Amino acid sequence: MLKYVSWLVKGSVALGVIALLFLLISNIWIVNSTKDRIYDSIENAPSTDIALVLGTSPKLMTGDPNPYFQERIRLAAELLKQGKVKHIIVSGDNRSKYYNEPIKMYNALLELGVDKKNIHLDYAGLRTLDSIIRCKEIFGQDNITIITQPFHSYRALFISNYHNIDAFSLSLTNIPDDFSYKVKAREYLARALAVLDLYVLHREPKYLGEKEVIAI
């Protein structure tokens, strides 16, 4: 019995070490392979066909405005205004009539003066992977600027690289680094899961459907 317990403890420790190593290696790989495609200036960012705005809730759990949401919308509108992109896709979760990220992003862009003809809604961006793959496979776009926060950009670009999408990210953030430790901590795990999704599970979006190619 003692030998069995000892073996179980050693096995658990070994698995824990392997998991930590995988987590570390995944994060180093993703960050180092994408960091040169992240821009912090609209002026220096390359021009692309599409700004892909990744979804997030417009409100925090407290009911206060979500600064991540506000920044993504502001950047997308400014890119279009300056001619850095030709069209905007807002991609997010549409789980119910009470929670609809694409509609919230669409309305926020309209409030900033963006013409509705320059916005396309993707209601099936349930995950970052879904949003990026659907941008290419459903909407026919593979030259994109991804709009999100810096810590999220690495994973989004890593997925884009895997699917042969010519992508850059613009992350002109003024949000304090300590705004949400929990969100950033989850991202370390999400990067490791992204490696598994792409190279082991070969995961596809939950919903694909018919093509809706956007004419640029």
Image: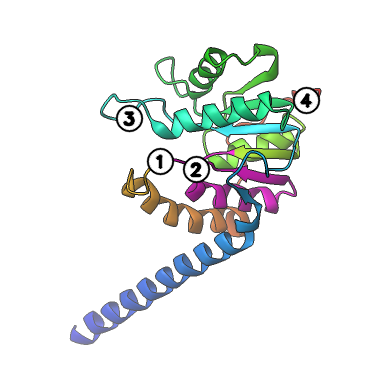
Residue 205 visible in the current orientation: no
Pointers 3 and 4 in contact (C-beta within 8 Å): no
Which residue in the structure is indicated by mark 3?
Answer: 60
Q: Mark 1 and mark 3: span between their CA atoms?
A: 14 Å
The x, y position of residue 32, in whole percent, is: 59, 64
Pointers 3 and 2 in contact (C-beta within 8 Å): no
Write down the quadrant of residue 31 in the picture.
bottom right
Three-letter amino acid code of the residue under disc 4: Val
Which residue in the structure is indicated by mark 2?
Answer: 149
Q: Mark 2 and mark 4: span between their CA atoms?
A: 27 Å
Asked if the stretch drawn in magenta spans residue 25, the answer is no
Say the numbered circle drawn on residue 213: 4
The stretch in magenta equals 147-174
- Kindly report which numbered mark, 4 or 1, lies closer to the viewer in this rendering: 1
Quarter of the image for the C terminus: give it: top right
- Kindly report which numbered mark, 1 or 2, lies closer to the viewer in this rendering: 1
Three-letter amino acid code of the residue under disc 3: Leu
Say which label, 4 or 1, has the lower sequence index.
1
Say the numbered circle drawn on residue 175: 1
Q: Mark 3 and mark 2: span between their CA atoms?
A: 16 Å
- Kindly report which numbered mark, 1 or 3, lies closer to the viewer in this rendering: 1
- Kindly report which numbered mark, 2 or 4, lies closer to the viewer in this rendering: 2
The residue depicted at 67 percent of the width and 46 percent of the height is 168
Say which label, 1 or 3, has the lower sequence index.
3
Q: Mark 4 and mark 1: span between their CA atoms?
A: 35 Å
Pointers 2 and 4 in contact (C-beta within 8 Å): no
Say which label, 1 or 2, has the lower sequence index.
2
Q: Which residue is farthest front?
A: 43
